[in-house]
Amino acid sequence: MRLLLVEDHKPLQRTLRQSLEEEGFAVDAADTGTEADHKVRTANYDVILLDLMLPEVDGMSLLKQWRKDGIHSHVIVLTARGELDDKVKGLDSGADDYLVKPFELDELFARIRALIRRRHSVKDPLIKVFDLEIDTSSRTIKRAGTMIHLTPREYSLLEFLAFNRGKVVSRTMIWDHLYDENDENTSNVVDVYIRYLRTKIDRSFSPPLILTRWGEGYMLRDENTPAEVGKSPT
Amino acid sequence: MKSLRLLLAGWMVPLLGVVLLAVGFLAYRTADRLLVERQGAARDLEALRRDERVKERLEQLDKELLDQAQNLARLMQFQLDWGKFRFRDLHILGMLGVAMADKGFVMIPGWTAPVGRGPVAMEFFRRAVPEIRFNDQELQHHLDDIAEYFQVDTTWGSVFRSASLGMEEMAINKQAFFPDQVLHHEFDSTSLANGVAVRRVRLKAPAGRVPFFAFSRRGPGGFEGRPPGRPPAEPGRGEPPPPDRPRGEAAPRSLVFIQCAYPLSKLEPALELIRGEYETRVEELESASRRTRLALAWQLAGLGAATFALAIGGTVALVGWSLRPLQRLSEAVSRISERDFTLRVDPADFPSEVYPVCIRLRETLVQLERAFLREKHATADISHELRTPLASMLTTLDLALRRPRAAAEYKSFLEDCRMAAGHMRGIVERLITLARLDSGSDPVRPQPTNASALAEECAQIVRPVAKARDITLDVDAGAPCWLLADPDKLREVICNLLHNAVQYNKPAGSIRLRVAQGQDTVLIEVADTGIGIPANQLDLIFERFHRVDPSRHGDGSSAGLGLSIVKGYVTLMGGAIAVESEPGRGATFRLHLPVKLGLENPGRALA
């Protein structure tokens, strides 16, 4: 999942970014309002973490402008202003959530996950595809009752596929959601990770869940997916 | 808490009571005095009437006494006339009659005989008839039982006394009693020798027949003792003494003195009656005026009570009515909350007494709202400034604890935490400094200070920071500039200004620190070539948490408190600070400090 972290306090930005990346999110960062605005208009972020007190353009104005311009990324306002007025104003301006500094990292992650579920219209944090269980809250997966360990990036890829199960996701889409602005975009990175995932969840189980659509991308098998389609060779 | 209404009523009640009592008392007293005067006048009138009646009664007595005396005199005269008649015709018989008839009638030998014979006859009778006798019956008839006492004296010595006198005698000095008058009477009040108080008339009259109208008033017909068939004596019948006849010696010799007296004690019942009537009248008058007075008192009391009740009711109503604007104002004030400081009333609706209160209240509320907002912003700013580094620190710690890490990584996290804590400490210290300035608990410790040396020292401190940003810092401080100041505070001020100059400078900019000695001030000037300050912000930069650019410039070391502290310290040391700037070209802070420490009140240190 790709996030934009808008925070002008450098040490906090650095630490937050590291925390989010370690959690498996792809994180872009912006120091000023202008930079944030620019980034939001060029990339499709799942969640934006927005500080309100920013140089150049303040967060509230940015948020209003984005909503007006039809940018629907989920926004969590991160601010040191904890007054009720500020919260109400923030939520009324189009924020999806509001978190007052200082906050617990776990809470921030939980709220981000909740927003991602909401983005994909999923209420249940447990996603089941055949015998594959993905627990989005604890970020663990099981296949046929066996716990499988995934790296954060592998998990993020699987989660993204799971949220879009039954649908084909292109390599670019995967790239956009899983990698941040600093990652080198080489087209086979996605294929490499797909291969890792298949090794972990498909090799010793049946049926294979990760399907390849030649020339289009990949998709996670859904109950509705025709069996013959699923049997395409890897 | 006292109710204004109760208070006013509480004062009005006794005040009104006192006024009403005073007015009532005065009215009552005036009316009472009039009543007393009227009563007095009526009583005087009654007394006058009583006295007049007494006087009348006495006068009546006098008149009766006089009548009696005159009757007696006439009686005597008739006798004398009769005697004269007799004597002239029957000398001897007459003499005998006189001698014999001591019971028949009184023979008073008066004398009015023709000239020539008179004196002889007179002398005779005087000697022959030494006694005057009145027939009791006649006396009874003529005296009407009025005079208790009477006495008849004559010039020739005959005396007659009434039986009631007994042995008493009413003395009279015949010679001294109006000697040159023939006919005279006089009243007096005297007491008899036995102590009886009497009213007395003394009448002096000629003993002979004298044509005196007073004697003829009742006419001689009343004299029944005269012999029948004899015509009554008429004034013109005899030979009256000519009116112009000179008073001879005969006249004084033939005079009678009649005294009639009446005991006053016998008059007393009548007088008592008059006095009794008077007392009754006075009693009536007094009771009438008592009744009037009582009625007046009741009327006054009723009137007073009614006035009192009306006035109290009116006062309460009026006070309530006049307090209504205050009530409206109070309602409007109670609608004020921290969210809405507007006084929702129109001051023009209020009476002139409350109008200034409204206006003043409105002004105060505007100031209060401003202060409230400032305070709110300050609180928000403080929390923001403290929460951001705190969040940074907590996040770093959370991150560090999420999983085992390499030692180098931990070290990096710890360094981040140290930085955040240092940042927080800086803010907290600045806040404490400001709080001390506010409370005036930060005393100035003045000592002779060389501003030039101090400036050089500060430049040394800041220079490394400036150098890191490629900023040149020049100090223009030639001769030593001595002044009496707190060196610690002054150092803090200069360093703050220099840090600001570095922070808001452009890369490769320059800073010039100048110290100059003035007349009785020392000028310290910090000029930079930085981003400058917009003209509309020049007044605001010394306010707390104000930043020309809200950006925190990465490390967030600035919280917008530095210039507030600078201003506070400068004011505390009795100096002044001014700033001028050309946006984009730089800013110049000029600091004027008195050579002798200004005795500025520390409490007013911070604006």
Image (cartoon, coloured by chain):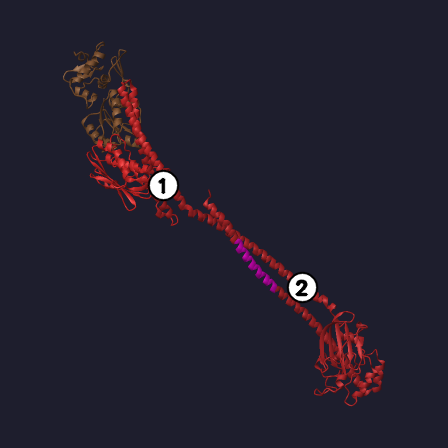
Chain colours: A brown, B red
x and y, in percent, of residue B157 in the image: 80, 81
Secondary element at tag 1: helix
Could you classify mark 2 by the number of other residues whose Cα lies within 10 Å: few (under 14), some (14-19), or many (20 or more)?
some
Give the quadrant of residue B378: top left
Q: Can residue B590 be seen by looking at this rendering? A: no
Secondary element at tag 2: helix
* Residue at (38% x, 50% y) in the render: B352
* Residue at (20% x, 18% y) in the render: A167
Does B22 lie within the magenta span?
A: yes
User: Mark 2 or mark 1, which has the lower sequence index?
Assistant: 2
Give the quadrant of residue B418: top left
Q: Which residues are magenta?
A: B20-41
| Chain to which the residue tagged by mark 2 belongs | B
Q: Can residue B212 be seen by looking at this rendering? A: yes
Question: Which SS does the magenta portion mostly show?
Answer: helix
Does B461 lie within the magenta span?
A: no
- Identify which residue, B165 or A130, lies in the foreground: A130
| Chain to which the residue tagged by mark 1 belongs | B
* Mark in front: 2 vs 1: 1
Q: Is residue B276 above or below residue A58?
A: below
x and y, in percent, of residue B529 in the image: 21, 38
Q: Is residue B234 above or below residue B295?
A: below
x and y, in percent, of residue B472 in the image: 21, 35
Q: Quote the CA–CA distance across marks 2 and 1.
A: 102 Å
Question: Label for residue B602?
Answer: 1
The residue at which mark 2 appears reads as B277
